[in-house]
Amino acid sequence: MTSETKIVRVTIGGDVQGVGYRAWIEREARAGGVRGWVRNRLNGDVEALFAGPPDAVEALCAACWRGPALASVENVEVAEADPAALGPIAGFRQIPTR
C-alpha cells in the first residue's frame, strides 16, 4: 500500500439484499482496480471495504447509490477505515454475512 491508497468502509441501506448487489459491487470494484471485500449484514444492509487509488475508490462509492437494476438504495455511509481492516487481500471478494 502506498500513500496514494484510500481505504473506506461503506454501508449501503435500502432494498440491497437478494438483488445481486454484492456481485455487482465485486464486478465494479475489480473493473476499477479496487481491492477489498463486500458482505451482507444481518440488519439488511450491505457493507464493503474499498482500498485503492483515491479517484477509483471515490467513483465506486458514488456508484453505490446506483447499484444493480433491482436495488433500491436509500442510504450510503462512507467512513475512513484503518488499513488493518483490509488484511492480506490481494483482490476483491465476497465474505460471510455478519
Image (cartoon, rainbow, N blue to C red):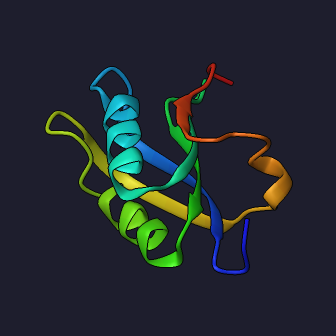
- Is residue 74 toward the left or the right of residue 7 in the image? left
Instruction: Please determine whether, in this image, residue 92 is positioned above or below residue 20.
Output: below
- Is residue 81 toward the left or the right of residue 77 in the image? right
Picture residue at 49% right of the left edge, 29% below the top: 44
Q: Which residue lies furthest to the right in this view?
A: 84
Picture residue at 48% right of the left edge, 66% below the top: 57
Query: Residue 67: x, y in percent?
Result: 27, 47
Instruction: Please determine whether, in this image, residue 51 is positioned above or below residue 98.
Output: below
Question: Can residue 71 be seen at all in this image of the molecule?
Answer: yes
> Residue 26 falls in which quadrant of the image?
top left
Picture residue at 29% right of the left edge, 26% below the top: 20
- Is residue 93 toward the left or the right of residue 76 in the image? right
> Residue 14 falls in which quadrant of the image?
top left
> Residue 10 falls in which quadrant of the image?
bottom right
Q: Which residue lies furthest to the left in this view?
A: 69
Picture residue at 14% right of the left edge, 39% below the top: 69
Query: Residue 94: x, y in percent?
Result: 53, 27
Query: Residue 32: x, y in percent?
Result: 37, 57
Query: Residue 66: x, y in percent?
Result: 24, 54
Instruction: Please determine whether, in this image, residue 11 is positioned above or below residue 39.
Output: below
- Is residue 14 toward the left or the right of residue 9 in the image? left
The quarter in which the C terminus is drawn is top right
Instruction: Please determine whether, in this image, residue 43 is positioned above or below residue 31.
Output: above
The quarter in which the N terminus is drawn is bottom right
83 and 64: which one is in front?
Answer: 83
81 and 83: which one is in front?
Answer: 83
